[in-house]
Amino acid sequence: MAALLLWGIFWARGKAADELCQRVEVTIDNADSTQFVTPQGVIAELARLGFRVVGKPMWQIDASRIEQALLRSDYLEKAECVKATGGVLIIRASQLVPVLRVFDGDQSYYINASGKRMMATANYHADVPVAQGHFTDRYPATRLLPMVQYVESDSLLRSLVTLYTMRDSDNIFITPAIYGHVVNMGDATNFEAKFRKLKLFYRKVMPAKGWENYDTISVKWDHQVVATRRHKAVKVEMTYDSAYDEPEPDLQTIAVDDNRHTLAVDDKKQEARNKKQEARNKKQETRNP
């Protein structure tokens, strides 16, 4: 009986090895209303890559090679390939889930959470954050992902930020939904503290000074926010630390206590600076009649 059982096992394996592939079954795990990868598309991709499996002996089909080839596709995040009984090759795949769309010159592409790139096409659109700028191998668009993911996890920031613009690695701008200004975040580090400063500036300064009064708000510096008026005539500096260098005469200083979140504007200093500036202007007019 033992010999018969052993013979039966080897006979079954031999039959399975001689079995021809009858069909390919493809399942897309995350297919939904935004589906852009279809089972037919995966089968067509297999043919394009040179894997013609139907009618081929199952033992000649390398499931591992098929997996690796499919994973190199721009449109897939995961792929598993299994040879089943009955001559069926089962492929289970997940389409790429974009988290950011990038515009770089004349190129446009999506990237997922791990940084895998998928070129944008007219056949597919994902409602994801948008970034623009010139990205390189030394500074790829993936450097923005921690900041983007932080913004997307905060309901207030998610509704506020509409665009990321990288002018260079030390000057990343965000365009808020609030009309009239941009925010300079500096580099892509320490963004949690920078957004806290920005929220405080929105609560304490903007309602008093006007939402269209400034064209640029910079939170790139430690312990301070520097806002530039639209016509570049005056800068407004909000600082978290009173121990800072005396600003230029055209600066109005706004000191903020981190613990109490109170606001104090030193108008007397500004008035004195204005008088000094007027005196300088009169001297200049006297010298140059």
Image (tube, helix red, strand yellow):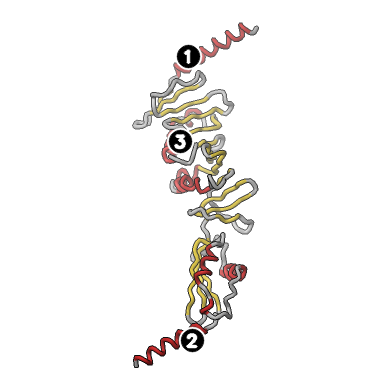
C-alpha distance separating marks 1 and 2? 98 Å
What is the crowding at mark 3: few (fewer than 14 residues within 10 Å), some, or many (at least 20)?
some
C-alpha distance separating marks 3 and 2? 70 Å
Looking at the image, is mark 1 or mark 3 earlier in the sequence? 3
What is the crowding at mark 2: few (fewer than 14 residues within 10 Å), some, or many (at least 20)?
few
Horizontally, is 54 left or right of 223 in the view?
Answer: right
- Residue type for callout 3: Leu
- Percent across and percent down for residue 192 are 42, 41
Q: Where is mark 3, residue-wise?
A: 198
Looking at the image, is mark 1 or mark 2 earlier in the sequence? 2
**Badge nearest the viewer, 1 or 2:** 2
Residue at point 50% right, 42% down?
A: 160
Foreground residue, 136 or 115?
136
- Residue type for callout 1: Ala
- Percent across and percent down for residue 121 are 62, 56
Residue at point 49% right, 22% down?
A: 251
Q: Where is mark 2, residue-wise?
A: 15
Foreground residue, 242 or 206?
242
Callouts 1 and 2 close, C-beta under 8 Å: no
Q: Which mark is residue 272?
A: 1
